[in-house]
Structure formats: C-alpha cells, structure tokens
Amino acid sequence: MEEINILVFSHVEERHLARIREVDPRVRVTAVDRQRGIELAPSAEIMVVGWNVPEDAVRRATKLRWIQSVGAGVDSLIVPEIMSREIVLTTSSGIHQSVVEHVIAVMLVFTRRLHLALRDQLRRKWDRSRASGEELLGKTLGILGLGTIGAEIAQKAHAFGMRVIGMRRTAAPVPDVDQVVGADGLRTILRESDAVVVALPLTPQTRGLVGEDAFRTMKPSALFINVGRGPIVQEQALISALREGRIAGAALDVFEREPLPADSPLYGFENVIITPHVSGTSPAYMDRAVPLFCENLQRYLRGETLRNIVDKELGY
Ligand code: GLV
C-alpha cells in the first residue's frame, strides 16, 4: 500500500489530525513547524499551509502535488517555487462567515455611532447628539470583490434592507446584488455607496487599486471597510482622506504593513476602528477548514477535480 504523506504547517489540534487520518488508511499526516517540515519535505505529496509559505520546504518537496491553504487569500503563496511547478493550489474559500459578520458589525457600529458612545462612556459623558445614529435600512453598500465572502456580505446586507451594488472582474449577476459592474465601474460603486467594503484578493490588478482618486470619488458621509488585503489600498491616500474629512470613517482589518506599526497615524483617529487581521478568526474556523480539506482529500484520492482551485495566473 503506497503511503500518502501530508505535512500540516498550520496549527491544528490532534482531533483534526485524527479526522484527516480517517479519510483513508494510506494517509500519513504530520503536523510540523518550519524546521521539521524542511526535514520531512522530500516525502511529502500534500501540504496544508497557513499564511507563511514554507518555501524552502516546498523546494525540497520534489514529490509535492498539492498545497491546500487554510485561508482564503493566497497572495503569499504566489511565489516562483509554486508558480513554476505543476503543484495544484487550493484555498479554504467558503468558510469565512466571521468576515461577513465582521463587516456587518462595523457597519452597525458606525451607523449606530457605538464607537463614539463607547468613547463617551469611558469619559463619563452623556452626549445624545454625538451618539445619535442612523439606520442601515435604505443605505447603499458597495462591495469591491464578489467572491464567496463578498456575495455573503451582500446577502446579509440585503436582509438589513440595504441596496447592494458591487464590482467584480466580470460583470455577471450575483444573487442579492442589485447592480454588478466590472472593473471599469469602480467609480460608479464609489460614488453611490454609503459604505464601501474591500473583499478583493491581492493580485497585480488589485494592488493599490483604492487610492487618492477613489477617496475623492467617495461620499464624504461614506464609511470605508477593508477586510481584503492591506496593499489593495494606498494607505497614505486613506490617511489623507481621513485627515481632510473626505470620508466619514474607516474600519480596517488589514494593512500595508502588519503588525501595523505603533506610530501609524491610523491609530489616532476617533472615526477609525482597527482590528489586527482577525476578521477571519473564530473558534469554529478549523472545524470548518478541516472537513473542507478532508472532502478535497477524498476527491484527490479518487482522481476528481478539487474544490477551490486557484488560477495561479489570476492569483485567486
Ligand atoms: C485571511 O486573511 C485569509 O486569507 O483567510
């Protein structure tokens, strides 16, 4: 019986490894850190990875056929060592419900002005005019990127009675999105939206996409949300827009540089909510990622097409 060696570089519990072993008696699965991964790489046929690409392990893994990422965005995996070889790359797209809830949460916080009420509370201040909010009902949400996450944000936002418009590479219809535009419609989305959310992958096409012009096109009353990747946004242009009051606020989970340096001006705005790249984390995350991998592993063993295959040229 030919063994199938799987190296797991991401942090997983023993019960998750046991679940993977149950898929097939040929499966040998080992959780490794970088060093152990390099040692065991020559026998690996499959790797399960987090954000950090074990590039030196991949280099030594001459039998490697498939890399499963436990995340959604694979920009850090688009490296020459993986691009140039016939290694299939798959994502864990479809399990990011927490990102969707995060976006709804920050829209509610800003719309109901909870961020200001909380600051007032800490100062023992009662200011009804500052803390009086609005409603999501009837507002327009613009979603940049209508992949699985973007489409689910649309569905939830619709349930709040929002009008939802969005941009994707090809302007094909998406359920719960009232108007879909292609990349040439970016300014339309920015101009019409009360909240703009970036749910795009980082690719050569999206790097720096949201810059000075975008922030000048947005409504001064609009909220800007980024749960995609930091470098899609030109951070300096965002800081200037916030300084000059050209947008109403921002909720940022991702940054050009992570961790966001302590001297970043972004920390200083009352109308900015900063979260340290956690919108995708939840205790339930691996309980969804592991079954998704197991399903893909079954497909792999049966010689079927895997779920969530990345188009390496497109970068997602
Ligand atoms: C997190 O950023 C992910 O891509 O899953």
Image (tube, helix red, strand yellow):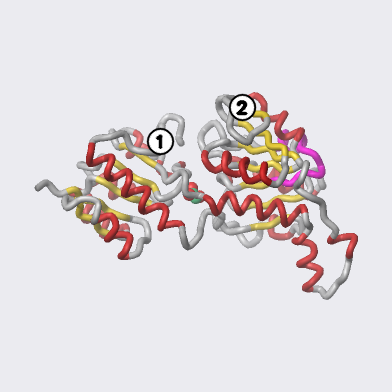
Left or right of residue 26: residue 216: right
Residue closest to the eye, 158 or 45? 158
Q: Which residue is at a point 58% across and 31% down the rendered structure image?
A: 174
Q: From mark 1 to mark 2, how far is it between C-alphas? A: 20 Å
Q: Amino acid at mark 2?
A: Ala
Is residue 143 shown in magenta? no
Q: Nearer the viewer, residue 172 or 198?
A: 172
In the rendered image, residue 198, in percent from the top left (x then y), is placed at 62, 42
Magenta span: 212-224
**Residue 28, located in which quarter of the rendered image?**
bottom left
Q: Quadrant of residue 139?
A: top right
Question: Residue 175: where, in percent of width, then height?
Answer: 59, 33
* Residue tagged 1: 310
| Amino acid at dot 1 | Val
Q: Is residue 298 visible?
A: yes
> Where 265 sits versus 172, above or below?
below
Residue marked by disc 2: 183
> How many other residues sit within 10 Å of disc 2, few (<14), some (14-19) or many (≥20)?
some
Residue in the picture at 29% in, 41% down: 66
Give the mark, 1 or 2, whose residue is nearer the N terminus: 2
Q: Is residue 41 above or below residue 174?
A: below
Q: Residue furthest bottom?
A: 124
Residue 52 screen position, x and y as percent: 40, 52
SS state under label 2: helix
